[in-house]
Image (tube, grey):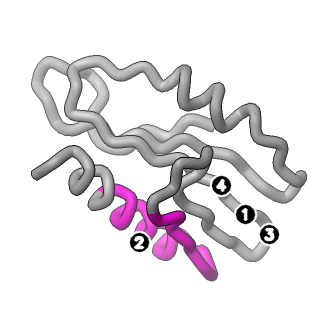
Amino acid sequence: MSNKKYGLQKERELKEMMKSFGATEVVRARGSFGAFDIIAFFPDHVKMISCKATKQKYFSYNAEWNKISAVELPKYCKRELWVWYSPNKERKLQGWQVYK
């Protein structure tokens, strides 16, 4: 599976997770080159989510976090970075990690 298809698969998976967490509407910014990939609308807030998936042994999310932190958001919006770490016996982190 190509890296692009792998990333799209994880975005779709995250979109469904947001629905299961109670989001009333979830929008995936297809072909997004902006700061956020997914926007999830909850009754009392909106989550602006950047989604990354990696198969690498080590992944630094600092550059991505700096990118989404630079965007001004209304008070009712929450920014989150979700990183999928593929299972790898050499890595401590595996699965979804959320950075807020």
Dot 1 amino acid type = Val
Highlighted magenta segment, given as a residue range? 10-30
Instruction: Single out the residue that lies furthest toward the bottom.
Output: 24
Residue 89: give x, y in percent of width and height: 11, 24
Mark 4 to mark 2: distance in Å?
15 Å
Q: Which mark is residue 16?
A: 2
Dot 3 amino acid type = Asp
Instruction: Single out the residue that lies furthest toward the right.
Output: 75
Mark 1 to mark 4: distance in Å?
6 Å
Q: Residues within 10 Å of mark 1 (few under 14, many from 20)?
A: some
Of marks 3 and 2, the one in the foreground: 2
Q: In the rendered image, which residue does mark 3 sit on?
A: 44
Residue 44: give x, y in percent of width and height: 80, 69
- Tell me, yes or no, whether the two marked residues, 1 and 4, touch with CB atoms within 8 Å: yes
Of marks 3 and 4, the one in the foreground: 4
Element marked by disc 2: helix
Q: In the rendered image, which residue does mark 4 sit on?
A: 48
Q: Residues within 10 Å of mark 4 (few under 14, many from 20)?
A: many
Dot 2 amino acid type = Glu
